[in-house]
Amino acid sequence: MAQQVIMPKLGQTVEESTIVRWHKAEGDAVAKGDVLFEIETDKAVLEAPSFYDGTLLKILVREGVPVPVKTVVAFIGEPGEALP
C-alpha cells in the first residue's frame, strides 16, 4: 500500500509551509531517513526526511506552493503500485 508523505507541522504556531526544493524526483528510490524536500516556514528552511523505504511514486505539491500542514504532498510505495 502506498504511503502518504505529509507536510510536517514544524512548530506550534506554524499552519502553512512551502516546499522550496525537492531532493528526489518521481521514480527515484527512497530510503528511510533520506531528505525528500526542503520546507520554508515563516522562520526557517528545514529538511524533511522520509519515514518510508520505497519509490517516490507521485509528487502532489510542487516547489513554491504554500500548503497547510498535514497536507499530503507525495506518495511512496512500490513501482507500479496504485495510488489511493
Image: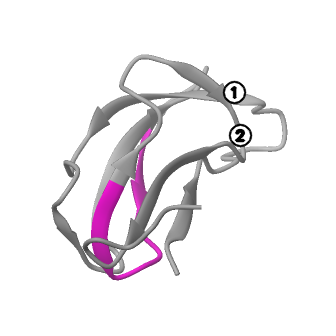
Q: Nearer the viewer, residue 2 or 61?
A: 2
Query: Looking at the image, do the residues carrying marks 1 and 2 touch, with CB atoms under 8 Å apart?
Result: yes
Looking at the rendered structure, the kind of residue marked 2 is Val
Whether residue 14 sits left or right of residue 41 in the image: it is: right
Q: Nearer the viewer, residue 25 or 2?
A: 2
Looking at the rendered structure, the kind of residue marked 1 is Glu
| Picture disc at residue 69 | 2
The percent coordinates of residue 47 (x first, y second) are 39, 49
Kindly identify the residue that appears in the image at 43 percent across and 79 percent down.
52
**Rendered view: 28 above or below 18:** below
Whether residue 44 sits left or right of residue 9 in the image: it is: left
Please state, as top left, top right, bottom left or bottom right, where the C terminus lies in the image. Answer: bottom right
Tally of numbered discs: 2
Q: Which residue is mark 1?
A: 16
Residue range highlighted in magenta: 46-57
Q: Nearer the viewer, residue 44 or 61?
A: 61
| Picture disc at residue 58 | none
Report the coloring of the rendering: one colour
Q: Nearer the viewer, residue 81 or 21?
A: 81
